[in-house]
């Protein structure tokens, strides 16, 4: 390199052959350039574990975990509540649906530390001992499951759905949002659209929800 020339690393055949491939690549894409032999800066130190109190199915749990742990992974991997399933892990399938403070959420899209002292209900918390929740019994009665993988999320979503309907919440297909929506098959299908059943047991799922909504057997 002659006097007065730019002393930043340039992409040449020599620099590549001399082992400067990584630095040359940085120079080529316009990133901050490094002198030969200079090391990349250290990556940011990951956060340490945090402790959070969770109320799940009426019981208190103390969890110490990475703050980036999702509620889904906290349930399954730390608290052995494996009824909640991991499907897509992207909030698309609904298999991980749980009920938090009366509302259904995708547990894969939220962090455990965000739910300190919230009332969390999973599929394990719906039954009363050996007595199934009415929605669980209706799913069995109407054969609303085949492989069963999506069923915990379907049932949790269906339980919350009835609460939303009773509260008068409209849906995308509600014709008159100022009136109490009728729980038609179209309403049920729309309200359950976030829960995918790859076995396509949808008609039976709708029938089970309608049964409970109309006061079916407990």
Image (cartoon, rainbow, N blue to C red):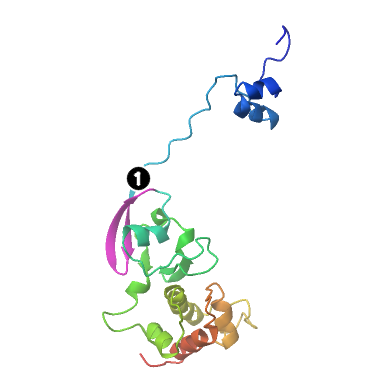
Across and down, in percent, residue 92 comes to 55, 66
Local crowd size for mark 1, using a 10 Å CA cut-off: few (<14), some (14–19), many (≥20): few
**Magenta segment range?**
52-66
Which residue is situated farthest in the front direction here? 17
Give the secondary structure at mark 1. Answer: loop
User: Is 69 drawn above or below residue 45 in the view shown?
Assistant: below
User: Is 166 drawn above or below residue 105 in the view shown?
Assistant: below
Across and down, in percent, residue 205 comes to 49, 84
The quadrant in which residue 18 appears is top right
The quadrant in which residue 114 appears is bottom left
Please state if 218 lies on the left or on the right of 214 as rendered.
left
Visible residue check, residue 216: yes
Residue at image x 31%, y 54%? 63
Visible residue check, residue 10: no
The secondary structure making up most of the magenta span is: strand
Disc 1 target residue: 49
Which residue is situated farthest in the top direction here? 3
Residue at image x 58%, y 83%? 187
**Magenta highlight on residue 33:** no
User: Is 47 drawn above or below residue 30 in the view shown?
Assistant: below
**Magenta highlight on residue 62:** yes
The C terminus: image quadrant? bottom left
Please state if 71 lies on the left or on the right of 181 as rendered.
left
Nearest the viewer among 76 and 198 is 198
Across and down, in percent, residue 147 comes to 45, 78
Across and down, in percent, residue 112 comes to 40, 56
The N terminus: image quadrant? top right
Residue at image x 40%, y 41%? 47
Residue at image x 48%, y 34%? 43
């Amino acid at each position: 390199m002659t006097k007065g020339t730019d002393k930043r690393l340039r992409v040449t055949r020599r620099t590549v052959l001399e082992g400067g491939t990584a630095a040359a690549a940085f120079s080529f894409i316009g990133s901050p350039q490094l002198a030969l032999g200079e090391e990349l800066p250290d990556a940011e130190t990951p956060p340490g574990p945090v402790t959070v109190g969770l109320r799940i199915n009426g019981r208190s749990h103390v969890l110490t975990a990475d703050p980036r742990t999702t509620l889904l992974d906290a349930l399954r991997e730390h608290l052995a509540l494996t009824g909640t399933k991991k499907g897509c892990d992207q909030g698309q399938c609904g298999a991980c649906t749980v009920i938090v403070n009366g509302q259904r959420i995708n547990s894969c899209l939220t962090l455990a530390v965000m739910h300190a002292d919230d009332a969390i209900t999973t599929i394990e918390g719906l039954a009363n001992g050996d007595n199934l929740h009415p929605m669980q019994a209706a799913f069995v009665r109407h054969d609303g499951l085949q492989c069963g993988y999506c069923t915990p999320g379907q049932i949790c979503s269906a339980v919350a759905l009835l609460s939303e309907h009773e509260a008068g919440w409209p849906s995308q297909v509600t014709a008159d949002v100022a009136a109490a929506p009728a729980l038609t098959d179209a309403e049920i299908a729309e309200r359950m659209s976030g829960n995918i059943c790859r076995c396509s047991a949808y008609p039976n799922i709708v029938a089970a929800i309608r049964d409970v909504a109309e006061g079916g057997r407990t």
